[in-house]
């Protein structure tokens, strides 16, 4: 029963977080080249006003860079294999309950 209560509270927290994120105002989508052009000005404005920048040149670089990685080298040289997500989550929740 304790596990069920923990899982329910985790789900409730996740649902709350999703509601909070979905209720935020959506910003208009702009082309990347326009965002890259505006980024230095946004960073300067945020420094002058003392507020957090909406985005930075680095965040744009991170979003537009190639983030597809292959595990084939780790699999062949180290014998790595990925586990099914269900097993991983089950082990993680068991570890959390024990600790």
Image (cartoon, rainbow, N blue to C red):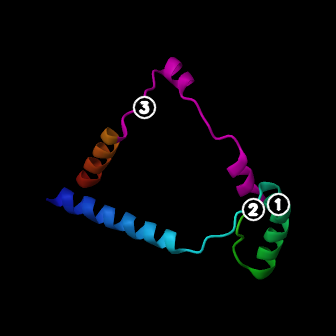
Q: Tag count in the figure?
A: 3
Q: Are marks 1 and 2 in contact (CB under 8 Å)?
A: yes
Question: Mark on residue 34?
Answer: 1
Q: Nearer the viewer, mark 2 or mark 3?
A: 2
- Observer-nearest residue: 49 or 61? 61
Secondary structure state at the residue bearing disc 1: helix
Secondary structure state at the residue bearing disc 2: loop
Quarter of the image for residue 68 reads top right
Q: Which residues are magenta?
A: 57-85
Give the Cα distance between marks 1 and 2.
7 Å
* Within-10-Å neighbours for mark 1: few <14, some 14–19, many 20+: few
Q: Residue at x 77, y 55 (%)?
A: 32
Give the Cα distance between marks 1 and 3.
39 Å
Question: Mark on residue 55?
Answer: none
Q: Nearer the viewer, mark 1 or mark 3?
A: 1
Question: Mark on residue 30?
Answer: 2
Of all residues shown, which one is farthest toward the left? 1
Mark with earlier residue (2, 3): 2
Q: Residue at x 69, y 50 (%)?
A: 62
Mark with earlier residue (1, 3): 1
Q: Position of residue 78 (x, y in %)?
A: 49, 21
């Amino acid at each position: 029963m304790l596990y069920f209560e923990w899982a329910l509270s985790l789900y409730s927290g996740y649902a709350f977080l999703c509601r909070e994120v979905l209720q935020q105002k959506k910003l208009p989508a702009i082309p990347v080249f326009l965002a890259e052009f505006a980024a230095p000005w946004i960073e300067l404005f945020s420094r002058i006003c003392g507020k957090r920048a909406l985005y930075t040149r680095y965040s744009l670089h991170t979003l537009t860079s190639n983030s597809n990685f292959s595990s084939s080298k780790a699999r062949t040289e180290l014998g790595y294999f990925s586990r099914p997500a269900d097993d991983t989550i089950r082990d993680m929740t068991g570890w959390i309950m024990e600790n």
